[in-house]
Image (cartoon, rainbow, N blue to C red):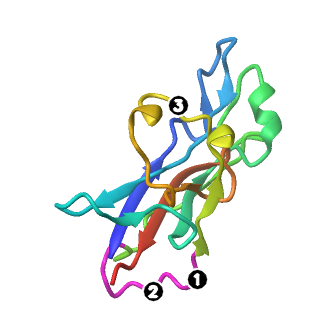
Amino acid sequence: MLGLVAKGFKEDDTGLEYIGTRRQQMGDGGVIMQIRDASGATVVVSNADWRCHVIHAAPLDKTCENENDPVAGTAPCGFDASEEPAGWDGADFDVSSWASASVFSEAEVDPKFGYDEISWDASAELIWGPDLEQSNTVLCRLTVN
């Protein structure tokens, strides 16, 4: 079993970046990964086979991005946050109620900072929660046989 905690950058529970500046915005997230064995053969990639669960989503109303003084938890800057489910990273934890990872294109996620420096396996896909902007913290798991 593999598990990962994926976090998009956010300044606070509004889910926004660069609060109070001209660059104030909702960020986006996205994860791509591959695991290779000692011989270099790809063993695991990120794709829709992963099961993911969002534990922080914000802002719930995307107009929050345009607020002059956004306040987390005050309309339109509401958020949903929960703790990691107890034992979610254990082999016996049941993720059958979690959604399959959402798959996005390179253009949708706008990857940066070294993405093009890696030779990705053709089957590795960018995954995240259901919304690139509102899903801020995502737990993802994959059972490997």
Q: Position of residue 54 (x, y in %)?
A: 57, 61
Give the residue at mark 1.
Answer: 97
- Rendered view: 78 above or below 34: above
Of badges 3 and 2, the one in the foreground is 2
Q: CA distance from mark 2 to mark 1?
A: 8 Å
Which disc, if any, is residue 11? 3
In the picture, the quarter occupied by the N terminus is bottom left
Queried whether the magenta region covers residue 91, the answer comes back as yes
Q: Amino acid at mark 1?
A: Ser
Q: Amino acid at mark 3?
A: Glu
Give the residue at mark 2.
Answer: 94
Q: CA distance from mark 3 to mark 2?
A: 32 Å
Q: Position of residue 79 (x, y in %)?
A: 66, 49
Q: How many marks?
A: 3
- The residue depicted at 56 percent of the width and 56 percent of the height is 127
Q: Give SS at disc 2.
A: loop
- Rendered view: 35 above or below 98: above
Q: Residues within 10 Å of mark 2 (few under 14, many from 20)?
A: few
Disc nearer the start of the sequence (3/2): 3
Q: Residues within 10 Å of mark 1 (few under 14, many from 20)?
A: few
Range of residues picked out in magenta: 89-98
Q: Amino acid at mark 2?
A: Asp
In the image, taking residue 41 as reference, residue 59 lies left or right, namely right
